[in-house]
Image: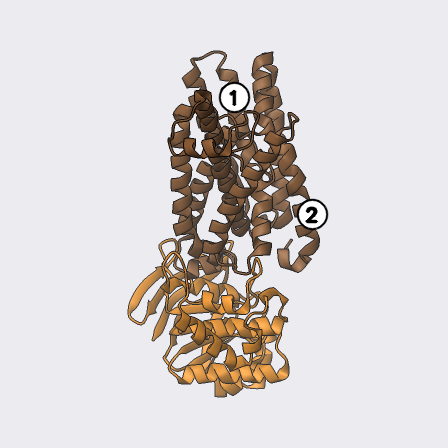
Chain colours: A brown, B orange
Amino acid sequence: MNLFSGDANIPLQEAWSLLWGGVVENTSWSYIMEERLLRTINAALSGGALAFSGLVLQSFFRNPLAGPGVLGVSSGASVGVAAGILATGFVAEWTGLFSQYALGAIGAFSVLVVLIILNKWIKGVTLLVIGLMISFFASSFVNLLLNLANDAQTRRYVEWGFGSFSSVSHETFGWYALVLIAVILFGIFYFPKLLNAWVYGEQQVIASGFSLSRGRLMIVLTLGILITLVTLQCGPVSFIGIAVPQLIRLLFKSVHHLVLLIASFVGGALIAVLADFILRNAGLPLPLNAITALFGAPVIIFVIIRSSKKQIGI
Amino acid sequence: MMKLNDIRVAIGGKELFHISEFQLKKGTMTALLGKNGSGKSTFLRGLCGFTQDITGNIDFFGCKMQFGKSFRPFSGMVYVPVKQPVFGRVTLLDVILSGRSSTRNFLDIPSQEEKQEALSVLEIFYLQEFATSIFTELSDGEQKMGLVARAIFQNAEVILLDEPEAFLDVGNRSRMFKELRKLADSGKIILLSTHQPNLATRYCDKVAYIHQKKLHCIPATECSEELVEEMFG
């Protein structure tokens, strides 16, 4: 659906044949189709990865309101992006891009590590509040950095902050997709037993034969890679990471994490593609985050009202 | 047989009690008595590697280990907490099945036989009708019986229980102790902490009590009312 809609009105049949490498009369169509295809794959993979990460965070922190955005992990990555964008004024393009990714990763990983260490003493809502404070801290740090930036750099950062699935670079996208798919596949195989145990607390993790520190390390590595990559590629996309896993938990009777992980990935992918579709057809220059918030915020409110205090444990 | 040697239970550097030697034989049921905060739970959790607040040596059916950072928990030992925190809409059956997750691969998919067995374990406490109920929506007592059922399902050699009588009504309390007695008689080792000396003397073989920071172990028949008064006095 996302493939076949857009300003250039390509006949469905021709579009279809293009996808399979066919030749059509208008050669510019082939370029447009490629753009749309990449954009759709990007939306699906990135949205899926965010929802996947959100599900893991919720089960790990045993908190239904956890998510990459709420806990400040995406904000950690955005400090790196701001610093990277700033650096592009002074160094070569590729160094700037590299430093963006490196600093973004450092930002996201350090927030994850801080949260996991704090989680030994601080649980539930208090941890979420700390995550929010980290977000505020990160954004004021970004503001400080942007003081040093020129107009063009500031605009680049602000546009990035709106979130978008469209900025796909042909050279790097293959790698991006490959790493996301590899990490998610690893997670789908490694996490079910670990997270099934984690919902009963750390004692059950030990009783299931895991080492706690190894389990935490695996979660930090996996989520750090996913959240950093998606945030740098698409901006701090809000609500998909927190609302989709909630919807999945509502829709599926099973609490087995093999089911939940796969369903969250697929659900996140669908919602992201749908959001992108709405965005492209709205006829207005809306930021992606406006669409995701429109869908996500009501879901979260519904979840909070629906869950009894006892059930969500906060 | 499980042997403990020179065990120290200490929280934050403050020693709670010391055990010079403690043996638990197959087919026996031992009650652990002591005041609130005397270190019973810490001791039981420490035996499973859930806390590093205990030091000393353990001989678990010939497998010798030292408590501390390098301690690896024994799969033949299971701990039943006073209360089990759960996140999400986990059913009672899910809880029971989680007892054997250490025997499954990373995908953690229970077999059909395991499910059947889990359901039959629930029958011990007449909980089969709650199999698909959400665990957190059950009463505290039903949850407690479910947790003991999980331990039975796990089929471990040693079962450690933290206040198995907690939250239970009078009828279920004696049923609980009778079932534990049956388990012991089938060759398991049972060690439970309790605040009910009368249940302990009635069903257990031995009573271990913490007094003046030492663990003393006596036959249950010798646990008189005067001694209990001295323990808690």
Q: Position of residue A301 (x, y in %)?
A: 69, 47
Residue B227 in sight from this viewpoint: no
Task: Look at the picture and state if B207 lies above or below A82.
Answer: below
Disc 2: which residue: A301
CA–CA distance between discs 1 and 2? 34 Å
Quarter that holds the N terminus of chain B:
bottom left
Q: How many marks?
A: 2
Task: Look at the picture and state if A288 lies above or below A188.
Answer: above
The amino acid type, in three-letter code, at marker 1 is Ala
Given residues A168 and A138, the one toward you in this image is A168
- Give left or right: position of B213 versus A286: left
Q: Position of residue A294 (x, y in %)?
A: 67, 38
The amino acid type, in three-letter code, at marker 2 is Ile
Q: Chain of mark 1?
A: A
Q: Chain of mark 2?
A: A
Q: Residues within 10 Å of mark 2 (few under 14, many from 20)?
A: few
Residue A98 in sight from this viewpoint: yes
Q: Position of residue A189 (x, y in %)?
A: 39, 51
Given residues A135 and A232, the one toward you in this image is A232
Quarter that holds the C terminus of chain B:
bottom right
Name the mark on residue A83: 1
Disc 1 element: helix
Given residues A38 and B177, the one toward you in this image is A38
Which residue appears farthest toward the left when viewing the image?
B62
Which badge, 1 or 2, comes first in the chain's sequence? 1
